[in-house]
Image (tube, rainbow, N blue to C red):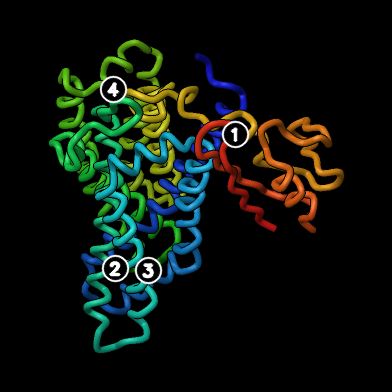
C-alpha cells in the first residue's frame, strides 16, 4: 500500500513543523538551561532579554504539530499519546511552569529565586523528555493491532536516556550560540567560552550513542544500513558539530549559531532516513496511518463558490463530507478558510470541522 500524494504532503508539512520547533524552541530551552548556571542577576536579565520577543511564539509550532497530527494522522496521534503519555505530560508541565516562571520572576522580587529555579527546571525537563522520546522511537515502539503494546516506562531504557541527555546538551549548545549572536560584552564572551565544552559534550554523547546504536536491540540500525547513502547526513552533522567546536576561536558571532542549526538539520534528516516510511517506528507507515483522502483534501478550501481551487474540488463538494460541513465553509466570510476535518472512523462517521477565520 502506497501513500497518496496528499498523505505525503501532510507528512512532509508535519516534519518541517517539527524541525522548526526543534530549532526555534531549542535555543529558547537552551538559554533557559544556561540561565540556571548563572548567579548574577543583571546577567540573568540580559539572557532573558535575548529570548523575550520569541519564547512564546516558538512554542506555537508544537501546537501546530499536535493539531496537524490529530487531523491528518489520527491513528499515529492515538498510538503516540498512549506510548508517550508520561513524557508528553512532563513536557507540558515543564513548558507551562517555565512560562509562568518567565512572567512572574519580574513581578515578585521575594519569590524570584523560586521562579528562576522553575524556569531552569522547566527548560531542563522539556529538553530531556523530547530527547528520550526520540531515542525511544529509534529503539522501536511496540504496537499490536494498532495499539501500543509496551511498558509505560519503555522510554527510560538506557538508549533513550542517553539521547535525552544528548538533546539537553544540544539545546544548551544552541542556546549558547544564540547568546553569542544576540548579546555583546561579558555575556557574549561567557557564551563563547562554553561553546567548546558543550560541543565536546555532545560529541562524547554521540560516541557513546553510536556504540549502543549498533547493538541489535536498536531497530533504526538495520534501516540505516539498508540505505548506505544515508550515512552522508550523520557525517555532515558531525562535520558541523566539529566546526561549532572551533568556531569559538574564529569569533564570528553569526557562525556558531548557523553551524549549530546545520547540525540539528543534519541530525533531523538522519532520523528521517532511519524511520521512513514509518510514522510510528517500526510499526505504522504513512500510508496506513493517514486519514481518508477526502479529509486531507478538504483541509484547505477557497471560499467563493464553495470549492477549493487549489485542490481541484468541484462545487458539488467532497465525497464523504456532510452537506452541513460544506455549508459551514461557504458561509465563512474570509477569503480563505482553513478547515480541519477529523474522521472518527468509517467514511459514514461524523466529522468535526474547525474553521479558522
Tell me how far mark 2 sits from mark 4, CA to CA. 34 Å
Q: Categorize mark 2 by other alpha carbons within 10 Å: few (<14), some (14-19), many (20+).
A: many
- What residue would you read off at disc 2? 119
Question: Residue placed at 19% from the left, 20% from the top?
Answer: 214
- What residue would you read off at disc 4? 220
Residue that protrudes farthest toward the left in the picture:
158
Q: Position of residue 160 (x, y in %)?
A: 20, 37
SS under mark 1: loop
State whether residue 59 is above or below residue 146.
Answer: below
Quadrant containing the C terminus is: bottom right
Place residue 43 in its image quadrant.
bottom left
State whether residue 226 is above or below residue 88.
Answer: above
181 relative position to 71: left or right: left
- What residue would you read off at disc 3? 99
Q: Position of residue 94 (x, y in %)?
A: 29, 61
149 relative position to 241: left or right: left
SS under mark 4: helix
Question: Residue placed at 25% from the left, 56% from the top?
Answer: 125
Quick check: can you spot residue 236?
no
Tell me how far mark 2 sits from mark 1, CA to CA. 48 Å
Tell me how far mark 4 sits from mark 1, CA to CA. 38 Å
Question: Residue placed at 70% from the left, 31% from the top?
Answer: 319
SS under mark 2: helix
- What residue would you read off at disc 1? 348
Amino acid at each position: 500500500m502506497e501513500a497518496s500524494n496528499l498523505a505525503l504532503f501532510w507528512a512532509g508539512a508535519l516534519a518541517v513543523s517539527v524541525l522548526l520547533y526543534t530549532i526555534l524552541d531549542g535555543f529558547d530551552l537552551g538559554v533557559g538551561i544556561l540561565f540556571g548556571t548563572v548567579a548574577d542577576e543583571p546577567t540573568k536579565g540580559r539572557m532573558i532579554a535575548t529570548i523575550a520577543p520569541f519564547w512564546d511564539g516558538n512554542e506555537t509550532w508544537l501546537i501546530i504539530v499536535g493539531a496537524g497530527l490529530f487531523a491528518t494522522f489520527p491513528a499515529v496521534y492515538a498510538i503516540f499519546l498512549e506510548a508517550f503519555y508520561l513524557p508528553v505530560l512532563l513536557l507540558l508541565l515543564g513548558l507551562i511552569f517555565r512560562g509562568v516562571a518567565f512572567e512572574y520572576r519580574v513581578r515578585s522580587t521575594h519569590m524570584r529565586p523560586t521562579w528562576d529555579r522553575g524556569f531552569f527546571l522547566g527548560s531542563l525537563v522539556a529538553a530531556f523528555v523530547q530527547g528520550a522520546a526520540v531515542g525511544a522511537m529509534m529503539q522501536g515502539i511496540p504496537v499490536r493491532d494498532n495499539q501500543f503494546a509496551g511498558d509505560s516506562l519503555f522510554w527510560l531504557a538506557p538508549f533513550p536516556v542517553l539521547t535525552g541527555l544528548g538533546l539537553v546538551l544540544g539545546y544548551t549548545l544552541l542556546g549558547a550560540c544564540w547568546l553569542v549572536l544576540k548579546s555583546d560584552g561579558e555575556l557574549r564572551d561567557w557564551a563563547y567560552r562554553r561553546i567548546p565544552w558543550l560541543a565536546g559534550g555532545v560529541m562524547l554523547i554521540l560516541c557513546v550513542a553510536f556504540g549502543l546504536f549498533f547493538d541489535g536491540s536498536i531497530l533504526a540500525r538495520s534501516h540505516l544500513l539498508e540505505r548506505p547513502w544515508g550515512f552522508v547526513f550523520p557525517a555532515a552533522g558531525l562535520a558541523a558539530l566539529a566546526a561549532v567546536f572551533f568556531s569559538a576561536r574564529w569569533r564570528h558571532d553569526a557562525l556558531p549559531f548557523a553551524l549549530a542549526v546545520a547540525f540539528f538539520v543534519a541530525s533531523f534528516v538522519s532520523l528521517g532516513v532511519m524511520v521512513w516510511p514509518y510514522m510510528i517506528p517500526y510499526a505504522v507507515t504513512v500510508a496506513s496511518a493517514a486519514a481518508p483522502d477526502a479529509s486531507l483534501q478538504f483541509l484547505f478550501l477557497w471560499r467563493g463558490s464553495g470549492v477549493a481551487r487549489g485542490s481541484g474540488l468541484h462545487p458539488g463538494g467532497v465525497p464523504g463530507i456532510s452537506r452541513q460541513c460544506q455549508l459551514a465553509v461557504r458561509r465563512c466570510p474570509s477569503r480563505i478558510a482553513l478547515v480541519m476535518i477529523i474522521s472518527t472512523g468509517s467514511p459514514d462517521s461524523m466529522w468535526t470541522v474547525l474553521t479558522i477565520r
